[in-house]
Amino acid sequence: MWHRNCGRWFTSLFRLPRNASRWHGFNSCFYPQDTISTTHDMTLTNAALLSSDPVFPFELEREIFERAESEHHLCATTLVLVAHRVRQWIEPKIYKIVMYAGSSQRYRYPPMHLHDKLVPRFSQWKQYAHHAKHVLLQDMEGQDAAEILSLCTNVEDLALWVLSDIGDQLPSVISSLPMKRLSIDVQALLTPSPSPLTQSEFKFDETLFTNLTHLDIISGEEWPWNNWKRLALIPRLTHLALNGEIRTEFMRGVLDECLALEVLVVLASVIDLNLQSQIGGLQDDRLVRMDRIEDPIGHWAAGARGEEDFWITAERVVKSRRQV
């Protein structure tokens, strides 16, 4: 069905003659099944259809193809076959989002099986890695995550969940990325060894996160604010999300000392009445409590596509409070 829809969309867009309206499927969207007459009153000639040369002005043609990709995502891998210039426009959009969530086939894109002799596609994917803007990696070793991220040099939105054996390489790779958004277990990243750290041993280090505007800390908030207070030294941090056992002292420290902060999201269970009472006592428009997300990977992917995520929802809540 989507092949026919795409065909109809392009037929109307290019105003093809009636006998050129049947298609071989979208793989041949510019090659109509019927032979086109060469009469001069035709909008497009056979030569124009079979040529990869531009039919419309350059900017208009680019807008047409980018709109097609935006409205019909499944057509993207076909659009890149039309012409080299179209591939240059569309290919970055195909590889803009990278997800590798362990055993979940639903959340594996593009195929890049590390250390898998049966499907050694990671090396083939390397040439496209610089297009990646949003990357989610879950259930893998820190070394593998570092190998992928060392190629994704333009990542702005990164989620690292349930990684094992972080090692020394991953923190240094992360520090080199132009990240603006990060979702991670900060304690696991900053812990130099697999041994659990005591409250007095752990200290938050902001040097890996200086470019962040959005930070989602998925665990570790049970530690005292005094050990985390260097969060306030992240100069552009406007959005912070906390998960887990959260102390009132921690939330108060964030709200008082993170001067650029616009939104503080607390993701917690609905039945956590103790936390609700703590939040109620703080009385700050920027503090928003939200239920835990049931499908975090799908939710993250929606945000990466520009759809509403918990950050946008929290922003709307804060804005509505300030309009009262």
Image (spheres, rainbow, N blue to C red):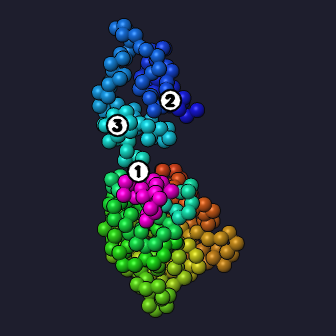
Q: Position of residue 130 (x, y in %)?
A: 33, 55
Q: Position of residue 260 (x, y in %)?
A: 40, 68
The residue under label 3 is 86
Closest to the observer, 312 or 282: 312
Decide: few, some or many residues near mark 2? Use Cα within 10 Å; few <14, some 14-19, many ≥20.
some
Q: Which residues are magenta?
A: 108-125
Q: Mark 1 and mark 2: span between their CA atoms?
A: 24 Å
Q: Position of residue 136 (x, y in %)?
A: 47, 62
The residue under label 2 is 25
Q: Is residue 59 visible?
A: yes
Where is 308 relative to 258, above or below? above
User: SS class of the residue under badge 2?
Assistant: loop
Q: Toward which corner of the image does residue 112 lie, by quadrant? A: bottom left
For residue 171, the mark is none
Q: Toward which corner of the image does residue 227 lie, by quadrant? A: bottom left
Q: Is residue 114 magenta?
A: yes
Amino acid type at image mark 2: Gly
Amino acid type at image mark 1: Tyr
Q: Residue at x 40, y 84 (%)?
A: 192
Q: Residue at x 29, y 31 (%)?
A: 58
The residue under label 1 is 95
Closest to the observer, 285 or 114: 114
Q: Quadrant of the C terminus?
A: bottom right
Decide: few, some or many residues near mark 3? Use Cα within 10 Å; few <14, some 14-19, many ≥20.
some
Horizontally, residue 155 falls left or right of residue 10, namely left
Horizontally, residue 276 falls left or right of residue 235, namely right
Where is 225 relative to 211, above or below? below
Closest to the observer, 111 or 53: 111
